[in-house]
Each structure stands twice: as C-alpha cells, then as structure tokens.
Image (cartoon, rainbow, N blue to C red):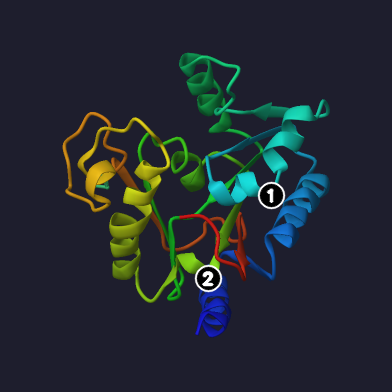
Amino acid sequence: MNELSLDVCAKNLGKHGFEIEIVSSLEEAGNRLREEIEKIHPQTVSYGDSITVRKTGIVEELRQRKDLMFHDGFNPDLSREENMEERRKGLIADLFFTGINAVSVTGSLHWLDMVGNRIAPLSFGPKRVVLLTGKNKLVSTPEDAVKRIKEIAAPQNVARHPGFNTPCAKTGKCHDCNSPQRICNAWLTIERCFPKGRILVILIDEELGL
Ligand code: SF4
C-alpha cells in the first residue's frame, strides 16, 4: 500500500513542479542532503526544526563547517532572542531544509506551524529548498492531510516538548485550544512548486518523525 503510495505520490508531485526522489533509508536521504550542499555550494544554509532532518546528523555537521554560514535557529548555546535572529536570517538562506507534516498522494504538501519560521521560507526566499519525509506522512487527500496534522502530528509534537500546558498535552487529542502555548498557529499548503524544481522532496521508504 505504502510502496504504491510512494510511487503515485512521486508521480503526482512531479506533475506539480516538484523535484522528487524516492530513497530507501534515512541514511540515503542524509547523503542526498550532503550531495546537494556539495552541488550548489551555498554561502548560507538554514533549516526548520524536524525530527527526520536531525536524525540524519546534518545539523551537527553543519555546525562544524567553516566554509559556509549556517543560520542555526535552534542553537542551545544561544538565547531565545539570538535564535530568533538566526531564524530571521534563515529566511533568505541560499539553501533551506526541513520536514513535512503531511503529504497528499494527489500531489500537495502540508504544514502547521507555531512560530512560522519553518513555513515562511518554503513559500519564498531561499533559492533552494530540500524537504525530507517518511512514508508515514503520506495520506490520500489534502483533507486527510489536515486531519492527520490536527489528530496526530500536533498533539504528538506537543508531547515531545515537556512543560507545554495545552489541553492536548494532557489528553493526547486536539481541543482547538486558545492556550498561549498553542503550537497550531499558521497553516501552509503548497499545491504547485514555483519556480518549477525549486523544491526537492525526498520521499523516504521508512517511518520517520511525527
Ligand atoms: S490547537 Fe491546542 S489543543 Fe489542539 S493540537 Fe494545537 S496546541 Fe494542542
């Protein structure tokens, strides 16, 4: 089912202007990210927080590199204000990468964000965007994508941040809250990639992330 979905999804995303690659493992996806960096020689790189991206080890590698400027908005050594400034700079990085909350096999990409730093550069800014996603993020329709995000991704995302005082932190379900710590603030759907090929989607044949 998922094998078929990956192929169908890739075909439909391709029709919508996205560059697509299917890889068999997270390791392969991480190597593809490294290849991309060597290929385009970006002067500046940034990222939006993503369990899948972090698992590749690329964030630690970029923190060590001296040949490019890495705008790391999740640096534990920086204050919140300093991290926010890094995220602002990341909006116009040459290369930006992150994960995806849900992918419709009909060929659209979907996110729900708290701060907005993850979704803003996906629409415009960075010259090149690379997105990693596990096969567990695939759904049948854009409506199912919204449902997946609200019912699975958002409550589970809250659960991995201890100290969040939202209703979903207690029940594991979304209550469409009005909490100051609400993580569900801004939606992004990308239906077509413009310019064509600006966004590379790497579909990974493994279950990864939330
Ligand atoms: S809207 Fe509130 S309750 Fe629902 S998932 Fe988001 S943070 Fe949790």
Q: In the image, is residue 32 above or below residue 17?
A: above
Q: Which residue is mark 1?
A: 56
- In the image: residue 195, left or right of residue 123: right
The span from disc 1 to disc 2 (Cα, nearest Å) is 23 Å
Q: Position of residue 137 (x, y in %)?
A: 46, 65
Q: Position of residue 190 (x, y in %)?
A: 43, 58
Q: Which is more toward the observer, 94 or 207?
A: 207
Quarter holding the C terminus is bottom left
- In the image: residue 36, left or right of residue 199: right
Q: Residue at x 50, y 46 (%)?
A: 122
- In the image: residue 104, left or right of residue 26: left
Q: Amino acid at mark 2?
A: Leu
Q: Quadrant of residue 182?
A: top left
Q: Which is more toward the observer, 194 or 9?
A: 9
Q: Is residue 209 visible?
A: yes
Q: Which residue is mark 2?
A: 13
Dividing the image into four quarters, tell me where ligand 1 lies.
top left
**Labels 1, 2: front one:** 1
Q: Is residue 128 visible?
A: no
Label 1: few (<14), some or many (≥20) within 10 Å? some
Q: Position of residue 69 (x, y in %)?
A: 72, 27
Q: In the image, is residue 45 above or below residue 176?
A: above
Numbered circles on residues, count: 2
Badge 2 marks a residue whose secondary structure is helix
Q: Amino acid at mark 1?
A: Thr
Task: Decide which of tag 1 and tag 2 comes sooner along the chain.
Answer: 2
